[in-house]
Amino acid sequence: MTIHPYFSVVVAGLFPQLALAAEPGRIDAFFGTLNGYLASVIFYDVFPGEPAMPFIVAWLIVGAVYLTLRFGFVNLRMMGHAFAVLRGKYRTADDKGEVSSFQALTTALSATVGLGNIAGVAIAISIGGPGATFWMIVAGFLGMTTKFAEATLAQRYREIRPDGHIMGGAMEYLSKGFAELNLPRTGKVLAGMFAVFTVLGSFGAGSAFQVSQSLGAVQELFPFFHEVPIAYGLIMGFAVGVVIIGGLRRIAHTAEAVVPTMILVYLAACLWIVLGNVEQVPQALSRIVTEAFAPIAVAGGMVGALVQGFKRAAFSSEAGLGSAAIVHSTASVKYPIRQGMVALYEPFIDTIVICTMTALVIVITGVYNDPATLALREASKGAALTSAAFATVSDWFPIILTVSVVFFA
């Protein structure tokens, strides 16, 4: 069976969750030759040479730039107002939803703040050099507007069922939005495809990467999992099941308690390392900025740094994938745009704050180009590489990282 290339490009543009689920070879092995063909188009290289910019990442960045300009840099102008909404200043009796704005934010963050911030950053710097951090921050800044648009649309087109539960997300605003354009059939088809591809994408981009990378960090402390890795998978499966079986409210309450705590613990550990090497911070920041433009990155010069930064930021923040919009649609607010403003903070916390702190640790400790960590870099074991960076401070610091990555995963 063959599929027209133009259809493949449309699928890639509309449903990036599927495209970011795995590398092309893994998609080919998992789904067979059909998806292998799709992957060859989805991962079409925009920039020639090595490394190359995948089409899907470029598509997400173009969309984010357009939205940022279209909304007049809402990601800067509305940060203060968004924080007031987040604190509950504008809460009213007319608010309708299943969870609070803060719970929706922490639930969305529970999916984005994870191994992408720890393992993904380490991999990006080991390939693209410290300059990849700069482009990661730029992509996170632009992704704030994408999240704003996604969350606002999810609230605008959500459906409150008779039992009080809410149906919302890209599948809802695709179907209803296209219906307003007199294209109801197109909207339904696209909504159905999005739902299916999001589920398929969650296996690779959501589950497999999180568990495999956290396993690498756990194995550094517990050799038992080297011999019986499936035991770790069963433990993680049970732990996740305990949370999600209770439904959205259980997930939201768990995320509200766990996510802020783990973010603070992880950031405190990073700050300890940064402040302990404070004399190296100016040099690290200088390298991050200069190597973002100068052709001295580890692989590919400026293009290599840009590609790795954008790729890892897209994976880490999930801006433009449509998954976080499902959670934001359930928030209890009076006006859709209020939750859109709250969603601005998601890429800010996830990519600009946490990824930057991880990057500083990686650059300051020098593990990204240390011959002793060559095997970890070649195997793309990002979490284990970050663990090696933590170990340069103290033997017990990797324990903090291991606990963090397990909770994040």
Image (cartoon, grey):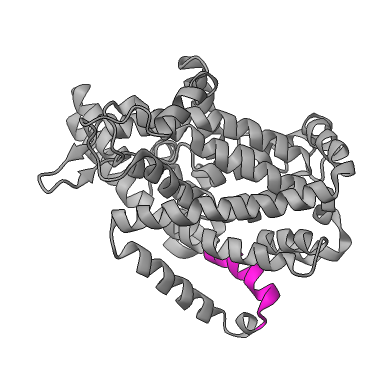
The prevailing secondary structure element of the residues shown in magenta is: helix
Q: Does residue 336 appear in this view?
A: yes
Query: Where residue 108 appears, x then y in whole percent?
Result: 43, 46
Q: Is residue 172 above or below residue 37?
A: above
Which stretch is magenta? Answer: 211-223
Query: Where residue 373 appears, x then y in whole percent?
Result: 81, 63
The residue sitting at 33% across, 42% down in the picture is: 100
* Residue 137 in which image quadrant: top right
The residue sitting at 90% across, 42% down in the picture is: 279
* Residue 371 in which image quadrant: bottom right
Relative horizontal placement of residue 118, taking residue 262 as reference (left or right): right
Q: Is residue 251 above or below residue 226?
A: above
Residue 272 part of the magenta-drawn span: no
Quadrant location, the N terminus = bottom left
Asked whether 173 or 394 is in front, the reply is: 394
Task: State how many labels appear.
Answer: 0
Asked whether 137 or 91 is in front, the reply is: 91
